[in-house]
Amino acid sequence: MTLREIQKLLDAEVFTGIENLDREITHAFAADLLSDVLAIARRGADGALLVTGNMTLQVIYTADVVDLGAVLFVRGKRPTVPMIELANEMQIPLLMTNYIMFETCGRLYQRGLKGCVEKVTDGSD
């Protein structure tokens, strides 16, 4: 699924990375805790879509460190100007939807997007 398809599906606003809307996104995960993002990233989240309501600059830094394909903010939360500037600098697409996280994830899953990890088996995450 491309970012453009995700944008249309979720009626999302694009803040950065409009030139990357044809980027293919094969998997996604949802988290507000950056420790969860880092834990999932070590299991193969590179190039994934992060669905989050976390509105800090650390989200952008984390997305860069774990090589995420894009960040999608939920619940109509708009990134700040410093977040947009940093994402532009790091070439990380930022999108925003008005849907809640549950609905957002359901729509993505229904359209075939898979999770980075289906089930945590060791209980440490």
Image (cartoon, grey):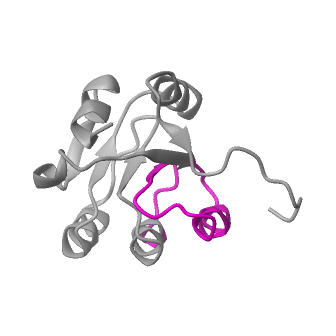
Q: Which residues are magenta?
A: 30-58
Spot the residue most to the left.
Answer: 19
Residue situated in front as seen by the camera: 122 or 60 = 122
Residue 77 appears anywhere in the view:
yes
What residue appears at the point 30 percent right and 45 percent down from the top-left corner?
Answer: 95
- Estimate the x, y position of residue 89 in percent, counting from the top left: 20, 75
What residue appears at the point 47 percent right and 28 percent down from the top-left corner?
Answer: 112
Q: Quadrant of residue 92?
A: bottom left
Query: 28 above or below 69?
Result: above
Q: Quadrant of the C terminus?
A: bottom right
Residue situated in front as seen by the camera: 59 or 22 = 22
Residue 52 appears anywhere in the view:
no
What residue appears at the point 89 percent right and 59 percent down from the top-left corner?
Answer: 123
- Estimate the x, y position of residue 76 in percent, counting from the top left: 39, 36
Residue situated in front as seen by the camera: 24 or 19 = 24
- Estimate the x, y position of residue 83 in percent, counting from the top left: 31, 65
Q: Is residue 99 magenta?
A: no
Q: Is residue 35 magenta?
A: yes
Q: Quadrant of the N terminus?
A: top left
Query: 12 above or below 69?
Result: above
- Estimate the x, y position of residue 68 in percent, counting from the top left: 41, 63
Spot the residue most to the right.
Answer: 123
Q: Taking 20 as reference, is 92 left or right?
A: right
Disc tally is 0
What residue appears at the point 21 percent right and 36 percent down from the top-left corner?
Answer: 4
Residue situated in front as seen by the camera: 70 or 42 = 42
